[in-house]
Image (cartoon, grey):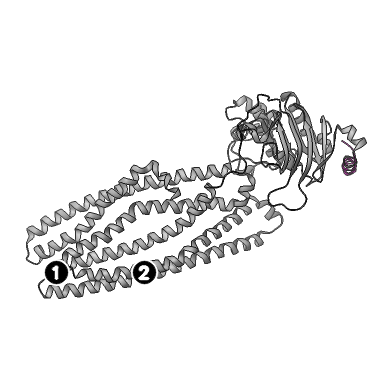
Amino acid sequence: MKLARYLKPYLLFALLTPLTMIGEVLVDLLQPKLLSQIVDDGVLPQNMDVIISTGVIMLLTIVIGGACGVGSAAFSGCASQGFARDLRRDVFGKVMSLSFQQTDKFTTGSLVTRLTADITSIQQLVDFSLRMLVRNLMFLVGGIIMMMQLDVSFGLVVAISLPLEALLVVLIMKRANPLYNIVAGRLDRVNSVMQENITGARVVKAYVREEHETERFGAANTDLTEANLKVMTLVALLSPFLMIIMNAAVIMVIYIGGMQVKAAELKVGEVMAAITYVTQILHGIMMLSMMFQTISKASASARRLNEVLDTEPAISGGEAVPEDRSGSVCFKGVSFSYPGHSGRPVLSDIDLEIKAGENIAILGATGSGKSSLVNLIPRFYDPAEGTVLVDGQDVKDFPLDELRRRVGIVLQKSELFSATAAENIRWGRKDASDEEVRRAAEIAQADEFISAMPNGYNTKIAEKGASLSGGQKQRISIARAVLKRPEILIFDDSTSALDLGTEAKLREGLQKSLAGTTLITIAQRIASVKSCDRIAVIDHGRIVACAPHEELLESCAVYQDIYRSQVKQTGGED
């Protein structure tokens, strides 16, 4: 019912659907009555005038009923499809607003299932409710009324058969309902395994683990199949039992009708009409049982969708927009641990002031907390303790959009989209001209290889940049950030796939074109950062020194160890 608000914009279609369906059902209820007239007043007394006139009326009513049926289907489609579109839009919007820790909690596979299978399940319920619920309820009520008009004794058949069918439906649906939650959970698992293997296909192939992953997918797929089979078996039991009751009711009608015809209290055509009515009534009950199945499945889906819609973003913005746009950053007493992480914090008591326009590097061993530190600036996560300031303002007080407009970040993993090279770069600023896009690519040392592609900047890039090398993906990602021209530009180990010569040209281009921009570079190669104004050395989540390269070589033991190991590996500083 919480999702019913999405039907409000389509209320006109939702009202027209049952109204036109009423017209179709009334025609269907009228047909047995007209047929009985043809039999009793036309065929038996051999009166062709009655047969022809009543037959014409039947044909006309069938045309009207058909038109009503088509209209009902069209109106229902407009309402249910619009409902699903708006719901899908809001669920996707909510997913986009969640923090990383919240999307990790739901898992990617589960969110995909909710946005696809779960919304489709509820859409089907809306469609069936607007059409089939009205249709079958009218067959149930209208059929009983028409039967009672023929002969009150037929009410005995309905009084016996209806409770039996209703009891069967309730018992089986009560057993089936919990299974739909299990099915949804196992579908999440299948989607998760599939998503992991599609995105991690290179690793799977590199380690020759195709067989293992096939077995893992097979186990998840088998679990889903078994859960589906349990539901289908339960529901399959319903149909034959309902058919037995319906056929028994027909036999009872024929028996009672035969007795009435023999006693000259009923005509043959009226008995035929009674058989049709009892079939319509009990068929309506059967279809209502299918409705209950749809409701059970949709209710499980609705709970899962409401779980997403009711989740408040863990990170929400403030309202302060400082006029200062210099690009200064300050960490004061910052400590941080990832949600669910136990043990030593990832970052401990960080104090670091980055001046506006400064070119600063953050250096440290793998797992020392470098990426975690810079992720606090655009508020991908919030610190457990302490404060992060941008332009003298606590980042928690910024509107999120405003904060992230001031910060450009090139991540360790280059994320590209199935679009042209120009469109991928233009993510940095959607209104950028072609010349600005090209200039950003030149700075990022990407113009040469993009221009050499078949269609240049209009060349379509495969999903996740599969058609490019690692270095090419990194350079397009850098061009995207450069085009944004933010006050603060963060390189999160995003030049690791570049050779030192290309990286040197990149840094020279950045210094010329982005003068005044605060540059923060995370790196593991000293050769990449030794020309920075300062280098902050982080070790086990703590900043142990922050100074220029030459000063660190004299005073910082951690930096000296890193330097010696890299010089030894490369055979020289350069």
Q: Nearer the viewer, residue 192 or 441?
A: 192
Image coordinates for residue 136, horizontal then vertical, percent: 30, 58
Q: How far across and how far down the image is residue 356, in percent?
A: 75, 26
Graded by Cα atoms within 10 Å as few (under 14), some (14 to 19) or many (20 or more), the crowding at tag 2 reads: few
Pinpoint residue 224: horizontal percent, then vertical percent.
54, 63
Q: Nearer the viewer, residue 313 or 513?
A: 313
Residue at the limit of the structure toward the right, as seen here: 554
How dense is the environment of label 1, judged by Cα within 10 Å: few (below 14), some, or many (20 and up)?
some
Q: Is residue 379 left or right of residue 508?
A: left
Q: Is residue 470 above or below residue 520?
A: below
Residue 480 lies in magenta, yes or no? Answer: no
- Using the rendered view, name the quadrant where residue 416 is placed: top right
Q: Quadrant of residue 286?
A: bottom left
Marks 1, 2: nearer the viewer: 2
Residue at coordinates 45% horizontally, 54% vertically from top-left? 121
Image quarter of the C terminus: top right
> Hey, what amino acid is under mark 1?
Val
- For mark 1, give the secondary structure: helix
From mark 1 to mark 2, how far is it between C-alphas?
33 Å
Q: Main secondary structure of the magenta part?
A: helix
Q: Is residue 476 visible?
A: no
Kind of residue at disc 2 = Leu
Q: Is residue 336 above or below residue 322?
A: below
* Residue for badge 2: 167
Front residue of this view, candidates 305 and 433: 305
| 451 left or right of 46 in image | right
Is 429 situated left or right of 82 in this image?
right
The magenta segment = 560-574
Residue 268 circle label: 1
- Look at 56% across and 53% down and name the residue there: 110
Could you tell me which secondary element the residue under label 2 belongs to? Answer: helix
